[in-house]
Image (spheres, helix red, strand yellow):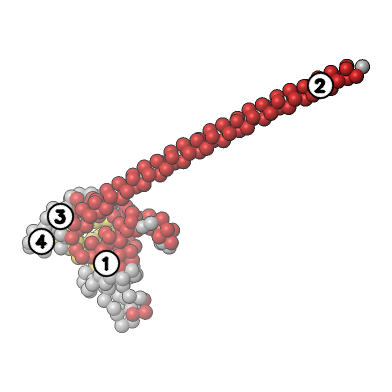
Amino acid sequence: MFKTLAEQWRANQEQKRAIAAEKWEQEKRWREEDREGRRQKQAEEERLRQEQEQERAAKEARNAETTSILYRAHFGVMKKAATVSYVSLTCHEDTWTFIARRAFGTWSPEWLTSVTQDGPGQGGPVAKEGAFRKNPNLTPGRITKQDNGMQTVEVSGDNLVTILERLWESAYGQSYYLAVLDPDPNRSACGPLYQRFETWLKGLEPGKADKPGHTLVLDERLDSAQPAQPLTP
């Protein structure tokens, strides 16, 4: 009887050891599977990180190339604008007001000159209306009003360069942060206006010595896409 009990005890112990060994092997397999899973996850995360880094670098390279192209094109436009003596610009008074405020810092639709006046109602700015960022030096006679809201402004080459610079900066040169802070709801008009000036400059023929000026019409009702012609004396 004691022999039978001893054999049963030994058999139970062998069975416990076998179960423990099997459990240990199973736990080792689970740990190895967990390690392999973590390695695969880490490898996948690293692969995704590298892909994202490559995409970011490619995007930055594309943005840098686009910016470089824009700057080169803008530099070409500015070089052409710098050669203009003056342009007789015809547009609606609201369009000129928008352009002038962008370029010079302040303007009112009823103004006929940038010369400071003694008081309001005299066709020009008064001291309390604020200083120009850059004075356009539009002396009396350089702005001609028409009955239909249109007007003609004799814009010097220097002012043309300023206008183009400010339109370009607002449309293409501003960072996202500055664009968000820009309070002007009509900022989106800067790009089309700049492109209209750019197209006009590309088709511009050099003026003659006795006819140094050019004309540009900003009016969708007129065929303003025709080549600019020198002003008649």
Task: Say whether marks 2 and 1 touch (CB < 8 Å).
Answer: no
Secondary structure at badge 2 equals helix
Q: Residue at x 23, y 62 (%)?
A: 161
Q: Along the line of sight, which residue is nearer the eye, 107 or 1?
A: 1
Q: Residue furthest bottom?
A: 118
How many other residues sit within 10 Å of disc 4, few (<14), some (14-19) or many (≥20)?
A: some
Q: Along the line of sight, which residue is nearer the eye, 200 or 61?
A: 61
Upstream in sequence: badge 2 or badge 4: 2
How many other residues sit within 10 Å of disc 3, few (<14), some (14-19) or many (≥20)?
A: some
* Mark identifier at residue 145: 1
* Mark identifier at residue 229: 3
Upstream in sequence: badge 3 or badge 1: 1
Q: Residue furthest right?
A: 1
Secondary structure at badge 4 equals loop
Q: Amino acid at mark 3?
A: Gln
How many other residues sit within 10 Å of disc 1, few (<14), some (14-19) or many (≥20)?
A: some
Please give left or right for residue 134 compared with residue 49 in the image.
left
* Percent position of residue 213, x then y: 15, 61
The residue carrying mark 2 is 10
The residue carrying mark 4 is 211
Q: Amino acid at mark 1?
A: Lys
> Separation of disc 2 and disc 1 at Cα?
117 Å
* Percent position of residue 194, x then y: 29, 55
Could one spot residue 150 in this view of the protein?
Answer: no
State which quarter of the image contains the N terminus: top right
* Percent position of residue 88, x then y: 20, 62
Upstream in sequence: badge 1 or badge 4: 1
Q: Amino acid at mark 4?
A: Lys
